[in-house]
Amino acid sequence: MQRPLWPAAPAARTVLVLAALLVGACAHRPLPPQALAHPELSAIERAFAQTLERAYADPERRWHSGWAGNIWVNLAGDRDLGLCYDWQRLVYRGVLPTVRRVRWHANGIVINKGTAREHHAVVVFDPRNADQDRLLSDPGDNPAWVLDAWRRGRPDIYPLEEWVALSWFRLVPPRIIGVITDED
């Protein structure tokens, strides 16, 4: 007897549909370093990568990423970090000197604020070519990039529009926010 391609059990169908949605949701990929069109953005990417290298080399902390990382961090001890706001603070502090040196701006960005799907990252842009007050309302005329290490634990950079599109459960629109650091 040949097995049907579509499982008969509703639970199995649900699992297959959810898996297909998850795969489809991953259509946006981070920009590879060679695709960064601006020399300033390339310098920021190098600072981003070095920040992650230093974090992973720190014997006092263990960094985790993604949803599995969230579970681990919430169940583990004080040495484990990797919630999205942990990554946001680390990345912001790590790239800020370079961002200032190249005369760009950096800030926090959050989507789904106040929900279980809340997600934080860092947004960078050239203030000579983009207006921070219009980054989210008019991203085509206000180019910006999101630095998001939480998803894969790597120095991933996304155009702002694509990063927003990654959150296919948009319950609360994205907002530009300040980043709270240990120095504050």
Image (tube, grey):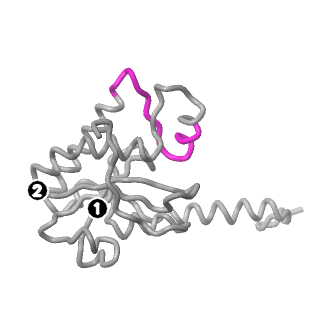
Mark 2 closeness class: few <14, some 14–19, many ≥20 residues within 10 Å: some
Determine whether, in the image, residue 40 is placed left or right of residue 66: left
Horizontal and vertical percent for residue 170?
Answer: 52, 68
* Quadrant into which the C terminus falls: top left
* Quadrant into which the N terminus falls: bottom right
Q: Which mark is residue 27?
A: none
Determine whether, in the image, residue 68 is placed left or right of residue 95: right
Nearest to the eye among marks 2 and 1: give it.
Answer: 2
Q: Residue at x 22, y 45 (%)?
A: 95
Determine whether, in the image, residue 7 is placed left or right of residue 172: right
SS for tag 2?
A: loop
Mark 1 closeness class: few <14, some 14–19, many ≥20 residues within 10 Å: many
Of 161 and 117, the residue lying toward us: 117
Quarter of the image holding residue 103? bottom left
Q: Which mark is residue 145?
A: 1
| Residue occupying the far right of the picture | 1
- What is the three-letter code of the residue carrying label 2? Arg
According to the image, label 2 marks what residue? Answer: 103
Looking at the image, is mark 2 or mark 1 earlier in the sequence? 2
Magenta-highlighted residues: 57-71
Is residue 118 depicted above or below 166 in this figure? above
- What is the three-letter code of the residue carrying label 1? Trp
Horizontal and vertical percent for residue 44?
Answer: 20, 50
Q: Residue at x 83, y 65 (%)?
A: 10
